[in-house]
Image (cartoon, rainbow, N blue to C red):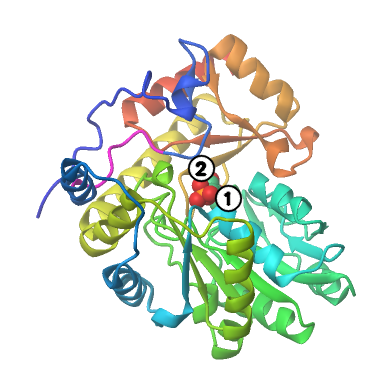
Amino acid sequence: MTTYNFDQPTERRHTNSYKWDSPQDGVLPMWVADMDFKTAPAVIEALRKRVEHGIFGYTKVPDEFYQAIISWFSRRHEWTIEKDWILYTSGVVPAVSAIIKGLTQPGDAVLIQTPVYNCFFSSIRNNGCTVAENKLIYQDNTYTIDFEDFERQCAREDVKLFLLCSPHNPAGRIWSQAELQKMGNICIRHNVMILSDEIHCELAMPGSHFIPMASVSEEIQHNCVTCVSPSKAFNIAGLQISVIVAENAEWKAKIDKALNINEVCDVNPFGVLALIAAYNEGEQWLDALCSYIYDNYKALCAFFHEHMPYIPITKLEGTYLVWADCSSLGTSDAITELLEREGKVLVNSGTMYGADDKDGFIRINIACQRERMMEGLRRIHTVFKRE
Ligand SMILES: Cc1ncc(COP(=O)(O)O)c(C=O)c1O
């Protein structure tokens, strides 16, 4: 069995990294959702071969691309996809935006579960729709769904689409079969289409089992469009590749048209080959990565428990994004600013995701070498130390 050394230090400054080259020198970035690890060796090898060819003209997406997706989701997630259901584009945000454009009319409302990934808000508004909110319930360091409110929102005349984040960024939840089924059935009952953003689906922590929304039942699959990508789990977001799965042929045609109108129907040669290599050869590396990230999470919890027990840490079932409750110390924006200025560590403020400023949440990206993460935690501690 191959072993992978995720402790190996990496240098990302001066590589035009958004995460590393935006903050001032000396500030440790634990914000933007990409990882400080090199991608899987198989992906690097596929890209190296392609670079050596030296010609980078327009790309035709080959049959292997579809086969890699179909095989991966069948093997890893027990979900049977047909080639005819698949579309591709240059990212999950462009995908979400085109799906909203294709399936809704300006003035419709799109339901989201807040706090949630910030681009959901902008994609909805950029397409002339309004945001309908089903606030998640925060209790005992985890989030659950307020189903009564969810059904009330779905029953609204203007709510036409439910944009699900699964696994949930930043709440760290992997939704259970029962939760997915309940949400899916409520949507069907009220004629609300489901758009499931499953970009984080490969990042399930040990003990948590990810289930694709569309795999829950045939009825739900017919009422659901799914977005996936290997970009988060294999750290290839810069290669801009994503996949849309729509079993409903009428909806698929509308989405295809919207992708064309938005002119995001072309992809680049690196994204295509990276996806094929990741899905065909990256399984072992991915399992090792998830277990490393989970060990990071456990080390983080132990550190907070020992040194800053007044900051509860939300349970992490999926993603590498830790949601910390700093409400005993102040408001989210002020804390984030203080951490950057005095602690030289950059995190995301909870307000970015629609959380209330007074709730004091910050989001910490732990997809980095353990030593680097511990340095970040020590910096947070210097700012929040209580003697
Ligand atoms: C839920 C979710 N969707 C989409 C994205 C970004 O997708 P892309 O970079 O493929 O546009 C992110 C990035 O963090 C995310 O968390």
Disc 2 residue type (three-letter): Leu
**Ligand 1 lies under 8 Å from the Cβ of mark 1:** yes
Image quadrant of residue 299? top left
Q: Whole-percent x and y of residue 63? A: 29, 73
Label 1 vs label 2: CA separation?
7 Å
In this rendering, the answer to whether 51 lies above or below 258 is: above
Q: Which residue is mark 2?
A: 321
Q: What residue sits 48% from the left and 29% below the top?
A: 18
Q: Assign a secondary structure to mark 2.
A: strand
Name the residue at the right extreme.
157
Query: Which three-letter amino acid code belongs to the residue tagged 1?
Result: Asn
Residue 169: numbered disc? 1
Residue shown at the point (41%, 50%) measured from the top left: 231
Magenta-colored span: 35-41
Q: Is residue 242 left or right of residue 175?
A: left
User: Quick one: 384 or 27, which is closer to the camera?
Assistant: 27
Q: Is residue 172 visible?
A: no
| Residue at x 65%, y 16% (from the top left corner) | 338
- Residue 32 place in picture, x, y as percent: 52, 34
Q: Judge left or right: residue 304 versus residue 107.
A: left
Neighbor class of circle 2 (other Cα within 10 Å; few <14, some 14-19, many 20+) is many
